[in-house]
Image (cartoon, rainbow, N blue to C red):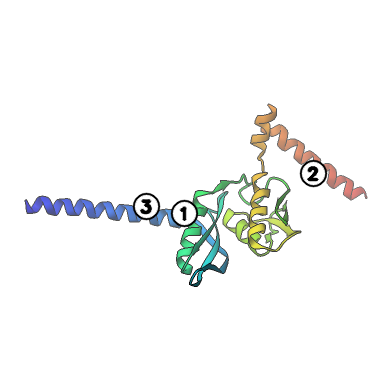
Amino acid sequence: MADQKQGGGERRGRGRNRDRDNRQEEQSEFVDRLVGINRVAKVVKGGKNFGFAALVVVGDQKGRVGFGHGKAREVPEAIRKATDEAKKKMIRVPLREGRTLHHDGRGRWGAGKVVLRAAPPGTGVIAGGPMRAVLDVLGVQDVVAKSLGSSNPYNMVRATFDALKNQSSPRSVASKRGLKVQDIVGRRTDGASEAGMADATN
């Protein structure tokens, strides 16, 4: 009887260890960045209750990214809530060669306006503040980004996601138009070479 109890305890222990290993693998898969944290106050009958609000972006640096917002009395708890929400709201963004965007894009949220431009290899991530955090966890290596509106981190992050959601890959465009991927990519390269020849002549 004692052996059976001992065996059951070992099985339960292995199950807990397996769950912990799965959580660690999931955490190691994603990279998170703390974009901003604010102290907030709730006015109640007896005075004010102070807490913290955290804005976090999470990504796997392979084309998936999400953002979340959390509030709590303590900073670590607010960050944990924001991270959990970000993992639930992740989106997938197609990347060209796994390093840059397929095409330029514009995003807007409230007073926040951003412009994202694809860049050649070696350019790096030319962006600042919240936009850089989003692009880093997304896995973009070459991009030029500019904020044209509000500097509020919440508006900037949402505007950046609005621009990323409008990204489309040659495969998706070809399927919608009933063409082959080579036709789409060929037109893009032909247009780039013609533009380069025009610049050389000018």
* Residue at (51, 60) in percent of width and height: 70
**Contact? badges 1 and 3 (CB < 8 Å):** no
Q: Nearer the viewer, mark 2 or mark 3?
A: 3
State how far apart marks 2 and 1 are (Cα): 37 Å
Task: Identify residue for label 2.
Answer: 192
Check the image and name the residue furthest to the left.
1
Tell me residue 87's x, y (percent). Answer: 50, 52
Label disc, if present, on residue 172 of the rendered structure: none
Q: Secondary structure at mark 3?
A: helix
Query: Is residue 167 shown left or right of residue 81?
Result: right
Query: Is residue 157 shown left or right of residue 11?
Result: right
Place residue 152 in its image quadrant.
Answer: bottom right
Earlier along the polypeptide chain: callout 1 or callout 3? 3
Label disc, if present, on residue 22 of the rendered structure: 3
Above or below, 113 against 103 in this view is below
* Residue at (54, 64) in percent of width and height: 54
Earlier along the polypeptide chain: callout 2 or callout 3? 3
Q: Residues within 10 Å of mark 3 (few under 14, many from 20)?
A: few
Tell me residue 41's x, y (percent). Answer: 54, 69
Q: Residues within 10 Å of mark 1 (few under 14, many from 20)?
A: few
Task: Identify residue for label 1.
Answer: 29
Q: Secondary structure at mark 1?
A: helix
Viewer-proximal residue, 61 or 122?
A: 61
Q: Hey, what amino acid is under mark 2?
A: Ala
State how far apart marks 2 and 3 are (Cα): 46 Å
Tell me residue 187's x, y (percent). Answer: 76, 36
In this orientation, does residue 180 appear? no
Q: Hey, what amino acid is under mark 3?
A: Asn
